[in-house]
Amino acid sequence: MRTVLVLCVLWSAGALLGQDSVLVRTGKAWISPERTMTHASLLLAGGKVADLSSRKSANEKSELFGRAQTVLTFETGVATAGFVDIHCHVGARDELAESAESFTPELRAALAYDPYAPGVRRLSRRGVTTVLLAPDDKNLAGGLAAFVKPGRPLVQGNPDAFLKISLTKDALHRERRPTSLLGATDYLREYYDSLATTEPADRTPAQKAIEATVGGARNVGISCSNPREILAAVELVASYRLEGFLIHARDAEKCLDRIKTADLAVVLEPLHFDSTEKALRLPGLLSSRGITFAFAGETARETEGPRLQLSLALAVRRGLEAKQALASVTTAPAGMAGLQERVGTLFQGRDADVLVWSHEPWNPRARLLAVIQDGHLVYDTRKSTK
Amino acid sequence: MKTRAGFSGVMLTGSLLLAVPAAPAAAQESPVLLEGAKVFTGRGEFDDNLQILIQGGKILAIGKQVPVPATDDLERLDLSGKWLTPGLVDGNTSLGLPSAHENEESSEITPHLRVLDAVDPASPDFRRAVRDGVTTAYISPGGKNVFGGLGAVCKTAGSARLLRERCGVRMTLGLMPSSGNRSFRTRGSPTSIYYRRPTARMGTIWEIRKAFYDAMDRRETRIGPTVEPSAATQVLIDALDRKIDVRTMARSDQDIRTAVRLAEEFGIKIVLDGAQEAYYALDYIVAAKMPVIAAPPSLATAADGATPHLDTLALLSGAGVPVAIQTGQATGSAAALPLIREATFAVRGGMSRRAALEAVTSVPATLLGVADRIGSLEKGKDADVVIWSRHPLHPSSRAERIYVDGIDVTDTDK
């Protein structure tokens, strides 16, 4: 049975290969978390959303129909933009940290990206069509995260996304600098302060990578967990006028004011059935204080279900507004990565990353009916028509 | 690129606020009159019939008969039978730090590290301190480095807690800085790259003298007009210029004597920390006019093989040495009792009650350079007040009500 399904998927993907335009017709579409459309028709061409319109009724063919070579119809389906995972380690075969040294801000995760690494393709079948492949928490300044579409080759022109910094215990090691949070903040300050005394021409690659974050030209993603790490991150951001987001921030509820004042966003770990009360409450708290947040950390493990989808269901069940939930996996992470013009919404001109769901994605019964990534059908439970 | 001035300016403003997670309580507006209690003002003896009027977080008036404002919202607290002291001041703690001895161990000379970077203001440590009547504490980096870093003076409750940053630089004598200087893997083979000075008491002193001599060199011969000393060197230069105290952890007799010699050699201002064997070196300490923030007198053991005596504090205060008491950085079975109980132990060892109370209020406030705000009950000072169920030094006394900045923080859980 499974073989048949796989063949079917391969066939339909093959059928689309080389074809330019696809029309996706769904019962409803979330163009953005703020805007929905009923009886939506989305024309995808050249890897982008070429056009969109709303049909008057479920059966009426839209004016876009004639322009499409392939038509996919999901009469009761709900289309959303592909999910964006802002902090993900799937897609590299080995550790995403150079452990000989803890301060490696110039290293690029893009160089570790492997489109054939185990599990990469499974990400897109879980609705994650964009991934920010981030260095892990083991280095104080781990390097630059890469913007990739899981399973698809790396696009050379894509700029590096954000600088990953980690103030967590993972970054401390007793046999190298830093061994403590005191030393970690000092190490970072030393580098930022060294910019003032070094001529631009004399700067090392590490200094250049750090310099790009001053004033917010490049975002920083700072891993921090408990209040003292969160406060150290906030202080650092204030000292050097950085912009970006906190990652993990499990104790963010104790520092909401400071996070809000520093204008930082928060990247949360996915929710699951065993999540603590504190973790389940946090999305609602952040949302009520107007702090942007995203869920991140999808897994490619076969034994585990899709994490982001479950997070949405659990968060909405705890009273988070549906559009906030959708934003937390689409527009919010896209904005944090500076990719809001590329992914996260289905406006005209955005990347053709479309998910078609059987129900609203935060409905526990929701199933993915189809996944289109850069205009390519990568997962489909139906046959295409026309 | 931003100029250096821009950088340091931003850094200063950023660091001057110690964050508090709880919503700041509204400043107390209506005046409160505390009357009827036996009052210890921070100096001298308990005094009956002193009235204290507090408003807006400050002490408006204190005296036998204070002028009472003619407002309707005046709250009169009848404290007959109670005992009242200033909020206690703990001379040395590790409140809110991840570990009792918080140090960056990748280097031995880290005088510029700021302890505030690792303090969690939401830590339950602070709550515990408040319940014991401690309203102000010195928070210090640990003693595993020769120079550990800069301490800070903080209140234990309230919305604006930081009283003084860059308060004293931690220097440690004895064997503790030797910890962590041998390889973890090869068990002490001197060929390992993790093997470094100091591994012995003599090496510690060598590191200190080298650091100060390097700082003196740096102060006197500038390398070009634009290059400024590193942050670490600048702190040591400030110490040499007596702009910053050197909080010196010295437990045993020979370390105390070394501290006195170092103070003479470099002209630095040393505040002794610990000083368990001060009874041996009493003459030295008196002659050098060196204040002591003494180890908890209830502890019968000490590191570095020092032998504590219960009467050390009594001897010191009897000899006219300014003595404050600390609960210190030890944890677990070696942890100290609440600060007021440690003062009780000092009295048990022969210290006068008056001196013991001063050692947890006005003396540490003076040594920490915050006596203009706290440590005694005087007009215009912060309204940090503790109301005790009986004489505070009695072994069963309890802090019944605690005010910080005029706000009752006894039962607030945040």
Image (cartoon, helix red, strand yellow):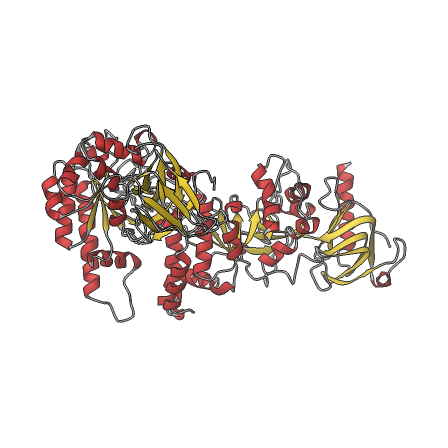
Q: Can residue A287 be seen in the rendering of this structure?
A: yes
- What is the x, y in percent for residue B235? 27, 56
- What is the x, y in percent for residue B150? 30, 51
- What is the x, y in percent for residue A220? 50, 57
Q: Quadrant of the image for the N terminus of chain B?
A: bottom left
Q: Tell me the quarter of the picture where residue A314 sits.
A: top right
- What is the x, y in percent for residue B321? 16, 43
Q: Is residue B387 left or right of residue A14?
A: left
Q: Is residue A291 left or right of residue B104?
A: right
Q: Residue furthest right?
A: A60
Vertical position of residue B316 compared to residue A128: above or below: above
Q: Tell me the quarter of the picture where residue A312 sits.
A: top right
Q: Can residue B137 be seen in the rendering of this structure?
A: no
Q: Camera-side residue: A233 or B267?
A: B267
Q: Tell me the quarter of the picture where residue B353 sits.
A: top left
Q: Residue at x 30, y 58 (%)?
A: B231
Q: Camera-side residue: B392 or A24?
A: B392
Q: Camera-side residue: B333 or B102?
A: B333
